[in-house]
Amino acid sequence: MKKLIIILIFMVSSISVYGAEKAGIIENFEGRVQIYDGTSPRPENVTETKTEIYEHNRVATKREATALLKFINEDKIALAENSVLTVESTNTYAPEAGRVVFSIKTRGKTSGVNISLTTAVIGVKGTKFVVDTSETGRNAIFLKEGELEVTSKEGNFKKYSEVQIDEYEAYVKKMMGEYDQYVKDLQENFVEYVHNFKMKAGSAFAIDGSEVHEIKFNKDIEQAFYLLNDVE
């Protein structure tokens, strides 16, 4: 009887490991990196390169740690420090925290990859981009190459266009202590409500709930793409 119980326990514990399909490997890493298997709250520390990643695994980097992931479909993803990525499948990735750098291989005309964010889904076909996720769930997307289509998970986005500010009027408002309200009121005239929008190479947007604002690249983002070099 005891022998039968041991066998059953082994079989149940093996389902989570062998029930999911292999997605890729951790090609390289520095510092403390952990993998959650998707069913257990207890992570395993990564101790060697070529550690296998399975669907539903969650990869987390700690302070001053980085990880470079290479997938069987030739996608490459790099995690900066204090970042988390869930591999939902080989066609769906979910960056949950920190900074994650994507290099997505071109698929066929109809197929592609989905990036699941807090309030949006990114449709990807052969691109390089960065997703920053804050503690509040705000996502910032920086597209280096290719094109992305961003779709709201629920309802429409409130997408703000770049505001054209009259310099003289802005000066007057500053003198009157009304500049912030002036800009806020002006922004409301440059809003469109859309269910999805496309991003071109070199563009960047921040998504906070349903609000979308255009933002700028910075040096930190440019340098983040170098995290992919070891798996190029």
Image (cartoon, helix red, strand yellow):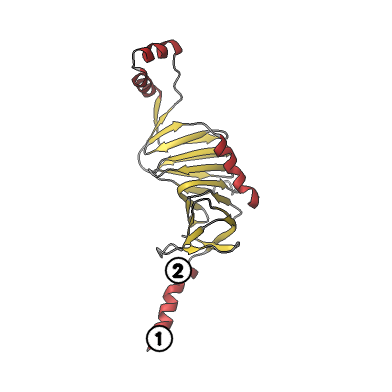
- Lower sequence index among marks 1 and 2: 1
Crowdedness of circle 1 by 10 Å Cα count: few (<14), some, many (20+)?
few
Q: Does 15 appear above or below 88?
A: below
* Callout 2 amino acid: Ser
- Circle 1 sits on which residue? 4
How many numbered marks are there?
A: 2
Identify which residue is drawn at 55% across, 38% down: 220
Which label belongs to residue 16? 2
- Based on the displayed image, in which of its 4 quarters is residue 40 positioned? bottom left
Element carrying mark 2: helix
* Callout 1 amino acid: Leu
Q: Which quadrant is the N terminus positioned in? A: bottom left
Q: Position of residue 141 (x, y in %)?
A: 49, 39
**Residue 122 visible (yes or no):** yes
**Residue 127 visible (yes or no):** no
Q: Does 195 appear above or below 78?
A: above
Confirm or deny contact between disc 1 and disc 2 (CB under 8 A).
Answer: no
**Distance of mark 1 from mark 2, alpha carbons?**
20 Å
Does residue 185 appear left or right of residue 68 in this picture? Answer: left
Q: Position of residue 190 (x, y in %)?
A: 41, 23
Identify which residue is drawn at 34% across, 13% down: 176
- Based on the displayed image, in which of its 4 quarters is residue 9 positioned? bottom left
Q: Position of residue 43 (x, y in %)?
A: 45, 63
Q: Which sits in the foreground, 76 or 136? A: 136
